[in-house]
C-alpha cells in the first residue's frame, strides 16, 4: 500500500513536471559546482525570469538563451510567461518570490502595470532587473538591460530614407503597443530621420492624420508621440497589424505605387507585408522590422520583407545574467548609463544593434552562429 502511494505521488509529480513543460514555462535547477551553492536554501530557484508572451518567437529566443546561459553557469532558474496579461505577470512574480528567488529579471507586458509586481519583489529584498522593456513609474527597479532602442528606430527610419524612390513617396507608419515604453523610443528614433525627409517632400504621410499634424516638428514630446502611436498602434499584435494595413489600403484616399512602410517589428512586418503584397496597385513596398525572427529572415531572403534589426539575445541574456551573478555575489554590477522610468534614473547596460538585409543575412546570422544555414531555403 505504502509503495502504491509512493508510486502515485511519483506519477503525479511527473505529470506536473510534464504539464509545466507543456506550458512552456520551465524550471532549470542548474548543475552542481555552482559558485553560489547554498545561497538559495528555499526551493533552489536563485533567478526568476518573467517574459511577456510565448506567442511571439522573439521571447522564445530569449527563453532559450536564459536556459542555456544560466544552466551552463550552474544557476537554478525558472522562466514564466505572462501571456500579455498583467494579472498573470503579477501572479508569476508572486510565485517566484514564494520560491525564494534572489534576483528577478522581468520583461513587462505593460511597463506601468508591472510596477506593483516589482514592488512586491522589492519588498522581499529581491533585486529587480528590467529586461529589454523598462518597468515605469516606480522606484522598485534596480537595473535595466536593454538594446539601444533609439538606434533601432533610427535604423528602421534610415533604411526607408535610403530606399525611397524619389519625391512624394507614400509613407505608411505603424507602431508598437502603447503599454510598451520601447514603442515610444523606437518611434522617436525613426521620426528623427524620417521627419526631415517628410519636411523636404521625399515622403508623404499616407495613414496618420496625427503624424501629418506634427510633420513640421523635428523633436516630438512623449505626449505627441503618444497621439501618433495611439492612431497607428499594432499593439504588437499580428492581427491588429493586418487589419490596420487592410483598412489603410482600402481607404478611398489610400496612396499607392512605390511605398515605404515603417513596421515596428518582424511579426507585425510580415502581416503588413502580406497585405501590401496582395494589393495590385502597390508596385513596390519597402518595409522594416526588428528581431531577426526566423520567419522574417526567410521573408527577407524571399524578398517579402526588406530589413530587420538584429538584437542579439545572446548578449542581452548574458548581460542580465552577469548582472544577476554580481548581485548574488554581493557585488555591484557594471552599468553604462541611465534610463529614466518616470520615477528614477535606472542604471542601465545598453547593447548595440545591427541592420540585417538580404546581403548580410549569412554574415550576421549564420557566420555568427545565431542560426544555421539549414534553417532557411534559398540562402
Ligand atoms: C521588443 C521587441 C519586440 C516587441 C514586441 C519590444 O519591447 O524590444 O524586440 O518585437 O517588444 O514583443
Image (cartoon, rainbow, N blue to C red):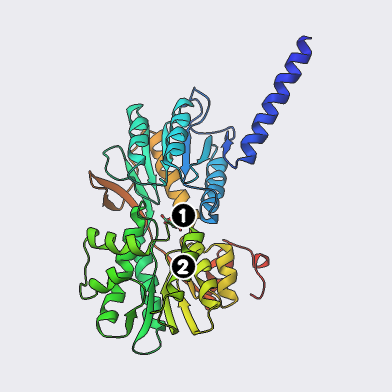
Image location (x, y in percent) of residue 3: 78, 13
Q: From the viewer's perspective, is 254 left or right of 63?
A: left
- State the residue at coordinates (37%, 65%): 232
Question: In the displayed structure, would residue 260 be above or below residue 33?
Answer: below
SS assignment at label 1 = helix
Residue 367 in view (yes/no): no
Specify which label sits upstream in the sequence, 1 or 2: 2
Question: In the displayed structure, would residue 165 be above or below residue 347?
Answer: below
- State the residue at coordinates (76%, 10%): 2
Q: Which residue is mark 2?
A: 289
Q: Quadrant of ligand 1?
A: bottom left
Image location (x, y in percent) of residue 64: 56, 49
Q: Residues within 10 Å of mark 2 (few under 14, many from 20)?
A: many
Q: CA distance from mark 1 to mark 2?
A: 20 Å
Q: Residues within 10 Å of mark 1 (few under 14, many from 20)?
A: some
Nearest-to-viewer mark from 1 and 2: 2
Seen from this angle, which residue lies furthest top?
1
- State the residue at coordinates (34%, 89%): 167
Q: From the viewer's perspective, is 122 left or right of 102?
A: left
- Label number found at residue 195: none
Image location (x, y in percent) of residue 109: 42, 47
- Label number found at residue 315: 1
| Total residue callouts | 2
Residue 167 in view (yes/no): yes
- State the residue at coordinates (51%, 30%): 45
Query: Where on the picture, by quarter, is residue 204?
Result: bottom left
Image location (x, y in percent) of residue 370: 56, 61
Front residue of this view, candidates 41 and 50: 50
Amino acid at each position: 500500500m505504502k509503495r502504491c502511494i509512493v508510486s502515485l505521488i511519483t506519477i503525479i509529480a511527473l505529470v506536473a513536471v510534464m504539464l509545466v513543460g507543456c506550458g512552456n514555462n520551465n524550471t532549470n535547477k542548474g548543475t552542481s559546482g555552482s559558485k553560489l551553492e547554498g545561497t538559495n536554501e528555499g526551493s533552489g530557484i536563485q533567478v526568476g525570469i518573467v517574459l511577456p508572451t510565448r506567442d511571439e518567437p522573439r521571447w522564445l529566443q530569449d527563453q532559450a538563451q536564459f536556459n542555456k546561459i544560466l544552466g551552463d553557469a550552474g544557476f537554478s532558474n525558472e522562466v514564466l510567461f505572462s501571456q500579455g496579461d498583467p494579472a498573470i505577470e503579477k501572479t508569476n512574480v508572486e510565485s517566484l518570490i514564494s520560491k525564494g528567488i534572489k534576483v528577478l529579471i522581468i520583461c513587462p507586458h505593460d511597463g506601468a502595470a508591472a510596477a506593483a509586481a516589482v514592488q512586491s519583489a522589492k519588498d522581499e529584498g529581491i533585486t529587480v532587473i528590467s529586461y529589454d522593456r523598462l518597468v515605469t513609474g516606480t522606484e522598485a527597479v534596480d537595473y535595466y538591460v536593454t538594446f539601444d532602442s533609439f538606434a533601432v528606430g533610427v535604423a528602421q527610419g534610415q533604411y526607408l530614407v535610403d530606399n525611397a524612390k524619389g519625391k512624394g513617396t507614400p509613407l505608411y507608419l505603424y507602431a508598437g503597443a502603447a503599454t510598451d515604453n520601447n514603442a515610444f523610443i523606437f518611434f522617436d528614433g525613426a521620426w528623427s530621420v524620417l521627419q526631415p525627409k517628410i519636411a523636404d517632400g521625399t515622403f508623404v504621410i499616407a495613414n496618420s492624420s496625427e503624424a501629418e499634424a506634427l510633420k513640421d516638428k523635428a523633436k516630438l514630446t512623449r505626449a505627441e508621440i503618444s497621439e501618433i502611436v495611439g492612431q497607428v498602434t499594432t499593439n504588437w499584435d499580428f492581427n491588429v497589424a493586418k487589419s490596420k494595413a487592410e483598412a489603410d489600403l482600402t481607404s478611398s484616399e489610400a496612396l499607392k505605387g512605390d511605398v515605404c512602410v515603417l513596421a515596428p517589428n518582424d511579426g507585425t512586418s510580415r502581416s503588413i507585408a502580406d497585405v501590401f503584397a496582395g494589393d495590385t496597385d502597390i508596385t513596390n513596398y519597402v518595409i522594416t522590422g526588428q528581431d531577426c525572427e526566423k520567419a522574417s529572415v526567410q521573408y527577407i531572403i524571399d524578398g517579402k520583407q526588406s530589413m530587420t534589426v538584429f538584437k542579439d539575445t545572446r548578449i542581452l541574456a548574458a548581460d542580465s545574467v552577469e548582472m544577476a551573478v554580481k548581485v548574488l555575489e554581493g557585488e555591484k554590477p557594471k552599468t553604462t548609463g541611465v534610463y529614466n522610468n518616470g520615477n528614477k534614473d535606472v542604471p542601465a547596460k545598453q547593447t548595440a544593434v545591427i541592420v540585417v538585409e538580404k546581403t548580410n543575412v549569412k554574415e550576421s546570422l549564420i557566420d555568427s552562429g545565431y542560426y544555421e544555414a539549414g534553417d532557411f531555403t534559398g540562402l
